[in-house]
Image (cartoon, rainbow, N blue to C red):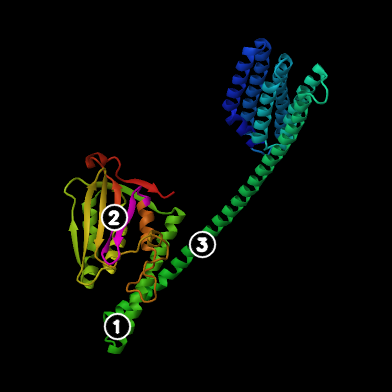
Amino acid sequence: MKDYLTLANELIWQRQTSFFTAAFLAAFYFDPVSIFACYGIVVLTEILDQILGARAKAWDGKDPVLGRKLLTAIAINTAVSALAISVFIANIAVQQTTGGQFTSLFFLFSASLFAAMHNSQMISILILRLSIYGITFLFIAFLEVVRYAPPITSPIWLQFFTIVFVLFFIGDISAKFYRGYQERLKQMKLMEEEHNRTKAALEVKSQFLSTVSHELRTPLTSIIGSLELVNNGVLGDIPQNFKPVIEIATKNSRRLANLIDDLLDLQKIEAGEIRFNLQPICANDLAREAVDSISGYASMLGISLEMQSCKDECYIMGDQKRLIQVMNNLLSNALKFSKENGAVKVRVENVASRVRISVEDKGTGIPENAEERVFGKFSQIDSSDVRKVGGTGLGLNITKQIVEHHDARIGYVSALGVGSTFYVEFDRLEDADDTDGISGNVSEVA
């Protein structure tokens, strides 16, 4: 019922344009007084439809008494509207004494087809309207037969049988539109049920990941701490043949800790539990801090870090902590995939109205059309059992989500055997001095 009235209100100008055009055309050739009198009644029913639409919008669908009143009002207004349109068309048919009834029949066919297409939400109302139109069709058909009493071979009888055929056609097409509407309703219901099941499954998954990750973090922290004590000789000297085993255990424990941290970050982002403290940030300072924080790891791998700062003002709005996480992910990936004695270059530059921070390496490169794997969850470009570098497969996915929550963009250009350049682009703050009032703004992940 609500769908019916909502659609009726949406199509009011389309209907009124058709009605007014038909009335203006008919008034030019026939009696304008009777034509516009019938048109006035049609306009009145349109106003009543608007009132009914407002009442239906306020109805929550739970009060059956109000629902029955609305249905009765819709039925009465439909009958009045269909009668007004039928009288309008029959008036034309009566006044047209020569040239057949093409004009009146065409107007009536158009009204019937419009009803079949747009009134299929309520089958009883559709049948009511089409029944009144059907009676008008028969009236026009018999009008010519009664007026001229022609023999069966006359074209007038051909028109009569054609009208009967048209009635069957309108009935058939109305049934098709009704079945199509019912099928769409079923599909929408199935989609809604599937959406609810998916939503429930995601909530269970998020709760499971959160619980398991938190439960694993505490004992794992103790294990890592104990292994560090052993490695550092705090508990005394350990035999040489034990050291490789302890180092492997320490390395894998840290890797597991990183996986847990990434899972917790991913769960928080997807659950909308991360809050971003947006403040004006100098992109040069951001990049320099990230480079300094990872320089020790780069030295251990034998890779040099180079930085090219932006010479102009390059302030952006962002969460310092989260953007450092973004830069660390990009830098650690570049270092892991670079060759020994290679170099990773960090560049900050203004590109039109945006600030771009890029991380360039001369590593193995990325195949074409691999963007979904690059930024996907638990996926890596080198996913074989013998890949050179480890990782959780979540870093770039988390990075992409953090960047997008800054209304920024992340992408890359790469070629196999040549290297890759990952970049992040932010809107540039034109005047950093005017951002004092913005500083400290907190944005919650939706």
Residues at discs 2 and 3 in contact (Cβ within 8 Å): no
**Residue that badge 3 annotates:** 205
Answer with left or right where residue 430 lies relative to residue 31.
left
Measured as percent of width and height from the top left, residue 310 is found at 19, 50
Which secondary structure, mark 1?
loop
Element carrying mark 2: strand
Residue 314 included in the magenta stretch of the image? no
- Crowd tier of the residue under label 2, counting other residues whose Cα lies within 10 Å: few below 14, some 14–19, many 20 or above: many
User: From what the image shows, is residue 428 above or below residue 234?
Assistant: above
Q: Please identify, in this view, whether the residue under mark 1 or under mark 2 is nearer the observer.
A: 2
Instruction: Depth check: give the residue in front, 346 or 384.
Output: 384
Q: Position of residue 97 (x, y in %)?
A: 73, 14
x, y percent for residue 374: 37, 62
Q: Which residue is mark 2?
A: 423
Which segment is the magenta one? Answer: 404-423
Question: Which residue bears the numbered disc 1?
Answer: 235
Q: Relative to residue 264, is residue 17 drawn left or right?
A: right
Residue at coordinates 33% horizontally, 55% vertically from top-left?
Answer: 411
